[in-house]
Amino acid sequence: MAGAIAETKPYLKGLDEFYRREIEPWLRSREAERAAAIRRRWWIIGGGCAGAAILAVTLWLAGAHPLWLLLPAAVAFVAAIVGGRATARLSREVKAYLAGKLAAFFGFTYQAEPADDPTSRFYQLSLLPSHDRRSLEDQWSGSASGVPFSLVEAVLEERQTERDSKGNRETRYHTVFRGVLLTLAYPRPFQGAITIRRDLGKIFNWFREKFSSQTPVQFEDPDFEAQFEVFADDPAEARRLLDAPVRRRIAALAGDQSLTMAFSAGQVLLAVKGDDRFELSSMGNTLVDPERVQRMAGEIGVVFDVIDCLDLRPRAQTGGG
């Protein structure tokens, strides 16, 4: 069916019908508002740019100092900012509605402003870089395939202070991590903490070992050793937990992603770098587009994919979708 949601994974079964019944009518009711907001945005941007052009020509004909030409540039910039805000409110409302509906479909809880901050725990397990400030959004939590989980989007920034040519101090922040922090219950018992990170070569691995409180663990597995570095409180326990099947699952899950993970206190924790998730595509496109829901559902579905890849389902749950 044209425009249908492709139910390509077991966890998406029934989503197309749910979309037609629960989501599409509301989106259709807001379509006229979206179109009006788009028109308003372009009127503001177009008017601002036209005014900036007229001002620039006027200043040039009047022989104004070249620095005055920064004024029309500022006018155009402000028009672009104000115009962009014309659709911001509706965009936030649509995102919140879609996230809430998809949370209901999956049986999860969604919070735009996370109630929990897992960054300290991830940092203590050496899954995140040092940082000076952080922002969190889009927390999903609940139980997927019988496995309790929590997922949060995080952006971490490090402060840098520099001096310009006049000796003035200038503070800037640059992003050191952007991605998701995922915590899931691990179904099999283990002791201590185990951290798994990408292999960065001999020099960087040496620094890791030098400043890690955990013990590096070696495996008789050349392929795994070529990709990952493992540190553990108890190396023997790490070798027991990370047997050959588990190592293969970890390698398959990591693929070419920038991923670090740990086993700690009955849970597996994953920090996965990536672009913003759970965001709407351009408001220039119609709201009545199943692709929006398809994409967001697929981004949430990473939880099910990790559970299946790492074989985290409780044994009584391993059958079915």
Image: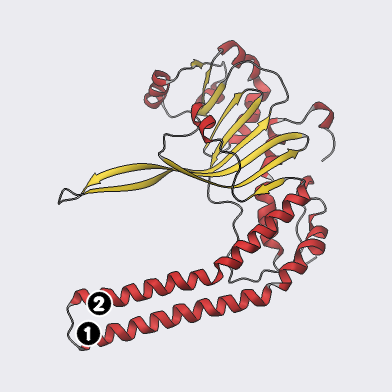
Q: Residues within 10 Å of mark 2 (few under 14, many from 20)?
A: some
Q: Point out the image quarter for the N terminus.
A: bottom right
In the picture shown, does residue 50 fall above or below 24?
A: below
CB-based contact (under 8 Å), mark 2 and mark 1 = yes
Task: Tell me the tag on residue 60.
Answer: 1
Q: Point out the image quarter for the C terminus.
A: top right
Q: Amino acid at mark 2?
A: Leu
Residue 152: x %, y % from top left: 59, 43
Q: Amino acid at mark 1?
A: Trp
Q: What residue appears at the point 60 percent right and 23 percent down from the top-left corner?
A: 264
Residue farthest along the left direction in this orientation: 166
Secondary structure at badge 2 equals: helix
Secondary structure at badge 1 equals: helix
Task: Tell me the tag on residue 69.
Answer: 2
Snapshot quadrant of residue 2? bottom right
Residue 254: x %, y % from top left: 58, 35
Task: Tell me the tag on residue 89.
Answer: none
Residue 174 relative to residue 83: left or right: left
